[in-house]
Image (spheres, rainbow, N blue to C red):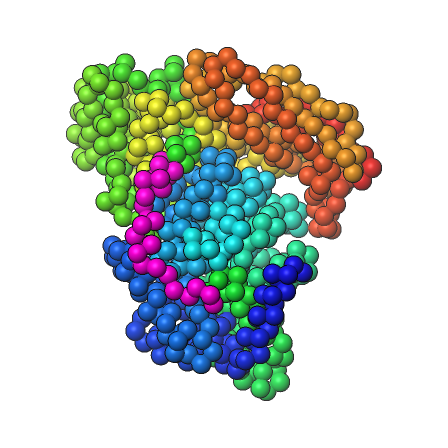
Amino acid sequence: MSHDASQIEARVDAILAGLTLEEKLGQMSQYPRLAEDDRERIRRGEVGSSIFASSQWAGKDMPSAAKAEFANAFQREAVERSRAGIPVLFARDVIHGHRTVFPIPLGQAATWSPERVEQGAAVAAREAAAEGIKWVFTPMLDIARDPRWGRIAEGFGEDPWLAAALAAAAVRGYQGDDPAAPDRVLACAKHYVGYGFAEGGRDYDRTQISAQDLEDICLPPFHAAVRAGVATIMSGFHNLNGTPLSSHAHLLTEVLRHRWGFRGPVVSDWNAVAELMAHGVAANKAEAAQLALRAGVDMEMVSDCYRASLAEAVRAGRLPESYVNQATRRILRAKVQAGLFETPYTDPARATQVTLTPAHRALARQVAGESLVLLKNSDGLLPLGDRFKHVVVLGELAGARDALFGTWTLDGQGADVTPIADAIRAAAPAGVRVTAVTAYPDKMVAYAHQADAVVLVVGEEPTRSGEASSIAEIVLPPGQRELIEAVALNDVPVILVVVAGRPLALARETRLVQALVYAWHPGVEGGHAVADLLFGRIEPQGRLPVSFPRVIGQVPVYYNHPPSGRPARARGYSSAYMDVAVGPLFPFGYGLAYTTFAYDELTVSGPVLRGDGAIEVAARITNTGTRPGVETAQLYVRDRVASVSRPVRELKGFQKVALQPGASERVVFRLTADDLVFAGADGALCREAGAYDVWIAPDSASGLKGEFTLEGV
Ligand code: GLC
């Protein structure tokens, strides 16, 4: 244990030794928000943590300095007027930015850039910490394959390798080297684990997850966060294979603590400890409290099972106090790590200085621009340049402000946003007239008739994705498909821009338009980012972090699936549908540029990968077009024969390469046997010798293919 770590332990031991049982249970209790009657509760040592939940700072237009003062006022009750003087850990759902709102995490995943995710998290931490928030409930690491599930918006998509890389980047961004720094916070990897496999895509519904999917797909992003030093973890609401996560001792203790060595606190999700009664595994609050604490939930979010029952359980000998001490120790350790004892208060003046700065806005625009995915561009319609002298911008969302923020933004303010239509008007070259119509579809169609080119902005308003926002029909909201059909009847080139929190089934719409740009919910600078892309001020470089189904009936559709004994093919007896083509509309990893790239000269450094060695897989990428571009080269493997049926492809690396027209670059990937670990039939992680296919590819459905053999494992 490092010197610092031993100092922290000594500090924690000293604090713990001085606490009463009630004060320990107070540390294990998290309240939903702060109100005047909380002052007395804080003075009594009953509040270990408080969430500045959605409704806190109602109206959100509270100035940053005032928010900081608000937090300080309640903190003084704890530090200066409670017996133990332990600071309260203030938390908030700072999910994809604070006042400077970045693209939703699914959009950030489309950048395939750990650097951008880290930078965005650092900005969010700086702005949140300045207002007294030292704990953010992010990154959300739930792998999702079902777009019906509204929370697909909050995660990093369907692949564990990409999600793991971005998880570590997010933790670095929020926590830095020292979460006690004034511009850093404690991160929280959530919702441990498997929450995204909700049956039917219905939020909170049960999950049935095989040992292989749990180990190979769901756990790796959380393990990456733990290895990156994430300070806290939040357990999920859901029932996994019959056991609710709030009482899942195997995952919360055996995997998290014994296998991975995680030492931070686990906080339940909102009311989830009490919901063990609704799950039907606890008859009352006392049983729920015992189940959750013994399984490994250290802090109870919002419900009161712990504080209502555990003191009596300890005094009656039904619960060893060691469980309470263990939980309190983890919580105190996190508070020491957050620097709360040295710096319990924040500087209101600083809050104003660091919020929504020009540099923050510039980064938000950069990340939004890199998150946009060009999915279709017939005849090189885009970039618009100045060829079209009258560009008509249509759609309600073309005039939207808050709607660009996406599903979970508590501190963004609509007035900060430049709508897409205004941004297009501002970015248009000289001589290009821009007309915007954001209301009345009949008026929109009439203006389309007069246009040289139409930019039609459609999609979802933010509350159609996110928590408790599952939808059964993943198509555009009512009326939008009809509008697209009506506009397309005017023989005018149509660029469809989709603002959404999830993949939508767009097979019909895609055929009706000449260009398609997926913007996700792009954040405070999303309007400018879309305009930058349409006029070619930036190059499209987004790549899909999730497969796009043709129709809802294909769901779940994802790339890293096992082949089946009769792999899907167009004809004959196979695992294909009779009424829809095989595979997704757009595959995982897919995205176009304004230029083109060629892949050739694949090499594998040797035919054999030894268990203790490494091989290098390389290829040359050339920009064969006339514009600069950024390509995301992806490395995939396939384990041809193993003790269990293995996926037809698995992502094992990616690199972004910026290339000028005509330029080439060799991308080199390094593979080791550790990259090829998987869960065998018994669910235990293993490595098996055998032959592998390997690709370097622009997406999960194409690329240059090579091979190697793994030996000596
Ligand atoms: C919510 C969400 C979780 C969030 C927490 C606190 O219900 O499930 O993601 O961080 O409660 O708001």
Q: Quadrant of the C terminus?
A: top right
The residue under the point 65% across, 23% down is 618
Nearer to us in this view, 320 or 473: 320
Q: Which residue range is magenta in the image? A: 341-365
Q: Name the quadrant containing residue 38.
A: bottom left
**How far from the left and from the top, in percent, is residue 296?**
59, 66
Q: Residue at x 27, y 33 (%)?
A: 420
Residue closer to the observer: 424 or 537:
537
Q: Is 421 on the left-hand or right-hand side of 39?
A: left
Residue pictured at 66% horizontal, 55% vertical: 260
Note whether 246 is above or below 475 in the view shown. below
Camera-side residue of 377 and 61: 61
Residue 364, given in percent of the width and then of the height, sits at 37, 39
| Image position of 298 with respect to 468: above or below | below
Magenta stretch containing residue 233, yes or no?
no
Residue 348 lies within the magenta run: yes
Q: Position of residue 671 (x, y in %)?
A: 69, 33
Looking at the image, residue 328 sits to the left or right of residue 491; the answer is right
